Amino acid sequence: MKKIVYGAAACLAVALAVGGPSAAAQPGEETASAPDAPPPFEAMAVLKAVGPVEIHAPGPIARRDVIASLPVAHSLTGVLGQDVRKMGLLAGGAVMPAGTPVFGVPMTDPYGSSIIWCAPKSEPRGETVAWTTICFPRGGMSGHQWVRTFAPLFPTSLSYTKSTSGAAGLTVDRKPADLPVMRLTFKFTEWDKDDADVMVSVEGPGAIAPIRNRSLPREADGSARLKIFGGEFRLIPVGGDRHAALLEVITPPSPTLKPEF
């Protein structure tokens, strides 16, 4: 049987599905029933800013246009200290070699709080690059399990059961690692009767991880305000078009930034 356990922050959508007892929430941890709640510090520490914020020019914007984005990188990184071997009847001799770059995600599982290490791998796919990622949560006879993620560069969920293959030999040397730069983005999606929706996601080469939806309440004149990165933006409706707005920059973002969701 598979159970869903929510990890470091539900608003980061880091969910862990395991075949075992449910994990207790950490102090300050938000559950899946509160997707718009601010994330705790340990969730925000997963990413670090590596460049200046970019904003959309004031004026017309459409559905899925980026209002603002920030280049980010994983802040918990390292390399595998030795080969990690996939265990089980269907393992097929798979090995993740020593020296493979990895990133960590703080999570709470049935065994307590820990950093779950994940190893991304890129492969050419036509004119683009495709990524796959294997994460190694705790559990199983070998001490860890071998789990392929759905969102390869910034996993938003891990799903596994007691029958999932194990992973033997996991050791990590924590150090800077060669991993792709991503972007934390805020995109306008649509107007609703009482609010404007803005989708927050982390995007990398050929990979998108939706994080949460921000519902911005409408003001008396029908507009809505978005406060991010130390700045403030105003969305103004355009007639009755749910997928169009005018963007006004009330206060530019701060030059000193950290990721926020």
Image (cartoon, rainbow, N blue to C red):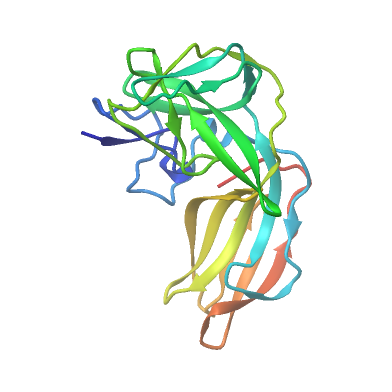
Question: Which residue is at the far front?
Answer: 92
Picture quadrant where residue 146 is located: top left
On the question of residue 209 being in view, the answer is yes
Report the front residue among 187 and 116: 116
* Number of numbered callouts drawn: 0
Question: Which residue is at the far bottom?
Answer: 239
Q: In x, y percent, where is residue 56?
A: 73, 65
Residue at (59%, 45%) from the top-left corner?
A: 260
Q: Is residue 141 above or below residue 115?
A: above
Residue at (59%, 11%) from the top-left corner?
A: 82
Picture quadrant where residue 67 is located: bottom right
Horizontally, residue 22 falls left or right of residue 70, namely: left
Picture quadrant where residue 66 is located: bottom right
Report the front residue among 47 and 2: 2
Report the front residue among 169 and 28: 169
Question: Which residue is at the far left?
Answer: 1
Q: Is residue 66 above or below residue 60?
A: above
Q: In x, y percent, where is residue 191?
A: 49, 74
Q: In x, y percent, where is residue 36?
A: 44, 52
Q: In x, y percent, where is residue 108?
A: 39, 26
Residue at (28%, 26%) from the top-left corner?
A: 163
Horizontally, residue 28 falls left or right of residue 97, namely: left
Which quadrant would the N terminus be assigned to in this image?
top left
On the question of residue 232 being in view, the answer is no
Q: Is residue 174 above or below residue 184?
A: above
